[in-house]
Image: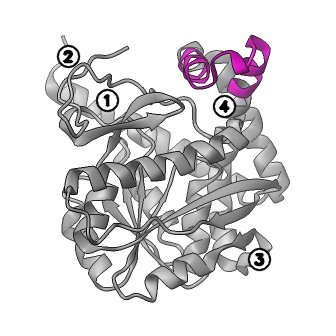
């Protein structure tokens, strides 16, 4: 029977091996042309797709729930496979970040609608930037800072602290800073009050009272209330942004018209839910147009509304 100390030693050894392998791969990738790096990521995703039956089932089930009979079995299988290869490409593109950070943004991205973010920030109350695990969400943050708007990125720390430290360095290459989810408000609120943008993702399942049910592809999905709560508290706009790959590590990035908290809203909980729903609907619209660009591997509908308050807050859950 393993002791706590031996488990800790094994865990640290595993973390060290994972980190060493990733750094070796990243170093080798940094020497290759961008298109070859992306192709290697594609092949990595294809290999994981062939081996990971569990996440193939999760992705297939999510697609069936979202699109129903609009997709046949062959179409679902094709999108699932592409989801894996896209995720491999996104991971491989991290190795390009030092190269991208040294270059002019237009070398790697076509940016549309940046004026929406600029106009929101010009009000002086900061701006919440929101997206999902769609396209390459990390690329959006990296290049936004290059365009003059570095931001705080609210993230969940990786289980491997060595990888987490590496990711934090990559994310900070152009001036962004990481805010870990636990006790995030201590840093989010001051940043917004100083007129800075802060990025929040809202497309992952939220457990229990941390979530509010909104419609996503016609089904109730428990979604974090943080975005709506902060927007209402500080009266700051929410700017959605999404990215679409152009090939070779390049992307088209599109900022959209902000979601505005209603200053005269009498029902605070209803206003939080409205903003959460609108942000989720923006993501759904992009995913319907480009279904293979969203990360279907996550159990998005895991928490189910067995019991809800009048405001739709999840107070019970079960796993499906």
* Residue 7 x/y as whole percent: 24, 26
Front label number (4 vs 1): 4
Question: Would you say the residues marked 4 and 2 are in contact, meaning their CB atoms lie under 8 Å apart?
Answer: no
Residue drawn at the location 42% of the way across and 42% of the way down = 16
Element type at mark 1: helix
Range covered by the magenta-colored residues: 57-80
Question: Marks 3 and 4, Cα distance to the nearest angstrom?
Answer: 28 Å
Q: Which residue is mark 2?
A: 2
Question: Marks 4 and 2, Cα distance to the nearest angstrom?
Answer: 35 Å
Position of residue 28 in the picture relative to residue 164 (left or right): right
Does the magenta run of residues contain 60?
A: yes
Which quadrant would the N terminus be assigned to in this image? top left
Position of residue 298 in the picture relative to residue 314 (left or right): right
Element type at mark 2: loop
Check residue 10 in the rendering and tell me which mark sits there, or answer none: 1
Q: Which residue is mark 3?
A: 106
Question: Marks 4 and 1, Cα distance to the nearest angstrom?
Answer: 29 Å
- Which comes sooner in the sequence, label 3 or label 1? 1
- Which comes sooner in the sequence, label 4 or label 1? 1
């Amino acid at each position: 029977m393993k002791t706590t100390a031996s488990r800790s030693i094994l865990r640290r050894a595993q973390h060290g091996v994972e980190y060493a392998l990733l750094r070796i791969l990243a170093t080798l990738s940094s020497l290759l042309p961008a298109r070859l790096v992306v192709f290697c990521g594609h092949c990595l995703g294809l290999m994981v797709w062939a081996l990971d039956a569990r996440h193939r089932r999760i992705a297939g089930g999510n697609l069936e729930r979202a699109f129903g009979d609009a997709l046949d079995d062959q179409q679902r299988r094709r999108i699932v496979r592409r989801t894996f290869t896209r995720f491999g490409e996104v991971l491989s593109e991290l190795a390009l970040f030092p190269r991208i950070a040294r270059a002019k943004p237009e070398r790697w991205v076509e940016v549309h609608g940046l004026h929406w973010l600029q106009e929101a920030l010009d009000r002086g109350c900061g701006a919440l930037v929101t997206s999902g695990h769609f396209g390459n969400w990390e690329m959006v943050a990296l290049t936004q800072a290059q365009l003059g708007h570095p931001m705080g990125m609210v993230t969940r720390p990786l289980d491997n602290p060595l990888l987490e430290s590496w990711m934090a360095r990559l994310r900070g290459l152009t001036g962004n800073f990481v805010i870990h989810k636990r006790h995030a408000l201590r840093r989010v609120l001051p940043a917004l009050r100083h007129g800075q943008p802060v990025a929040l993702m809202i497309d992952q399942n939220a457990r229990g009272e941390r979530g509010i049910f909104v419609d996503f592809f016609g089904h109730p999905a428990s979604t974090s209330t943080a975005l709506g709560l902060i927007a209402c508290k500080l009266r700051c706009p929410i700017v959605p942004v999404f990215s679409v790959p152009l090939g070779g590590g390049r992307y088209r990035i599109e900022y959209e018209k902000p979601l505005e908290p209603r200053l005269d809203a009498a029902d605070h909980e209803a206003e939080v839910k409205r903003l959460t729903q609108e942000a989720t609907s923006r993501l759904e619209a992009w995913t319907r147009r480009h279904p293979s660009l969203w990360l279907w591997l996550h159990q998005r509908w895991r928490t189910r509304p067995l019991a809800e308050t009048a405001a739709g807050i999840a107070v019970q859950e079960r796993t499906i």
